[in-house]
Amino acid sequence: MASQSQGIHQLLQAEKRAKDKLEDAKKRKLKRIKQAKEEAAAEVDQDRMLRDKEFRLRQAKIMGSQSNLSDEIDKQTLEKVKELAGSYNTHVESVLAQVLNMVCDVKPEIHVNYRAAD
């Protein structure tokens, strides 16, 4: 009987050690899964920051070139306005003189399509 109870006692102890080992393995597995999730989240965040930085650089490059283009268009517009204003100031007197001459110098003529009523 004593050897049987000692054998049962050894089996129970072995079963307890096996349960403890399984619990330790589960804890290590859960800890490793949690660590892997944290590493993956950190990697995703790092990649997101890198992509965001690249996007902002590209956006700044494109928007910068658009603002340069806008500045160039504004500059050309101002030059054209100045050119037109100079042309106006140069020719305004002669054009007004021509218009006044046409209006004031009336030369009565019979129109070519006029038919005298017989």
Image (cartoon, rainbow, N blue to C red):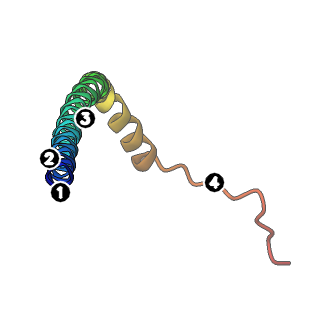
Residue 73 seen from this side: no
Location of mark 3 (residue): 40
Location of residue 40 by image quarter: top left
Q: Is residue 87 left or right of residue 37?
A: right
* Amino acid type at mark 1: Met
Near mark 2 (Cα within 10 A), the count class, few <14, some 14-19 or many ≥20, is few
Upstream in the sequence, badge 4 or badge 1?
Answer: 1
Picture residue at 30% right of the left edge, 22% below the top: 65
Q: Nearer the viewer, residue 88 or 24?
A: 24
State how far apart marks 4 and 1 are (Cα).
152 Å
Sequence order check, earlier mark of 4 and 2 = 2
Real-space Cα separation, disc 4 to disc 2, in angstroms = 136 Å
The residue under label 2 is which amino acid type?
Gln
User: Spatial distance from mark 3 to mark 1, Cα to Cα?
Assistant: 58 Å
Q: Secondary structure at mark 3?
A: helix
Q: Quadrant of residue 66?
A: top left
What residue is drawn where x is 16% and y is 43%? 17
Which residue was labeled with disc 2?
A: 13
Q: Nearer the viewer, mark 2 or mark 3?
A: 2
